[in-house]
Image (spheres, grey):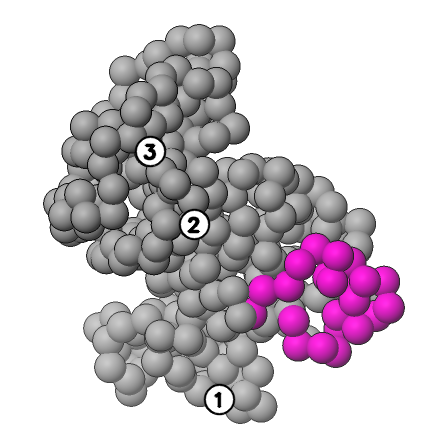
Amino acid sequence: MHTPNGILPVDKPAGWTSFDVLARLRGALGTRKLGHAGTLDPMATGVLAVFIGRATAAADRQLDHDKTYEATLRLGLRTDTGDVTGAVLETAPVTAGEAELRAVLPRFTGPQMQLPPMYSAVKVNGQPLYKAARKGQTVERAPRPITVYSIEYLGSPAPGDHTLRVACSKGTYIRVLAEDIGRALGVPATLAALRRTRAGVFDLSQCHTLPEILEAAASGALETNGWVLPVEHVFAPLPALQVNDGVRAHLFNGCPTSRFAAAEGRYRVYDAQNTFLGLAVVEGGVLRVEKLFCERN
């Protein structure tokens, strides 16, 4: 099959790491050049944007890194991983219910500092924390700034379980938030389920399951069904700029274009045929290429 270039939003299955998903897709998509944005824990499901081919360079240039999750909090239980897949460290009677939970939630919205969990990919002195955690070690780590924009109570699917919708910034650990909420309630807490419903500009409505994607790839439908989104999708918030063939040649050669009549700022750039070329910046009347996402022809 022709290897696509673009972004494929996947509905990650439970029990898979984000890396497992990429490994499974490499053969199906006919390329080793795959990346993803925003790692999900193995137990978590939902939006995982997979970047294919030349689009991989866009993964760390996204403008919107905010996330939305549906998280089920289990009260009365604490584990070493912060979720139900870990070893139980503590159990206690559940002395708080919906009313008490709703009362403490406002404390957890807004800008705050959060301590990354030991079972995380955060690196301290070049080593991921989870490697030390697996050896039973605890590493000194610094709290990091995050923002929780909103927490909405969605209901109680089972006694002691409560589901929340959390909108937050990049780098927010919902497992830590769950434990902190439990602490505020005076009971141990852990994460029973986690589903990411939005990651940046991608949401669940654009996602497809791995079996669906593998079947479409095998039949050749993935090239025509519109599931692979164009790379410029992640840059939609930027203004568009159309350039003539002379400026296009300058961009491809890495040459600045002086006395360029456009407002200062960052742009999505298209050629005269409306083909997306990449990103460029106008500073002091000079247009400079930032990153090209198309082939020269």
Q: Is residue 13 left or right of residue 186?
A: right
- Earlier-in-chain disc, 2 versus 1: 2
Would you say residue 2 is visible in this rendering? no
- Look at 62% across and 48% down and name the residue there: 13
Name the residue nearer the viewer: 82 or 252.
82
Name the amino acid type tagged 2. Pro
Q: Of circles 1 and 3, which is in front?
A: 3
Residue 208 sits inside the magenta stretch = yes
Q: Residue at label 1? A: 244
Name the residue nearer the viewer: 95 or 49.
95
Q: Residue at label 3? A: 75
Name the amino acid type tagged 3. Leu
The boundaries of the magenta stretch are 206-227
- Look at 35% across and 55% down and name the residue there: 155
Name the residue nearer the viewer: 87 or 137.
87
Q: Label 3's element?
A: strand
- Look at 29% across and 30% down and name the residue there: 94
Q: Label 1's element?
A: loop
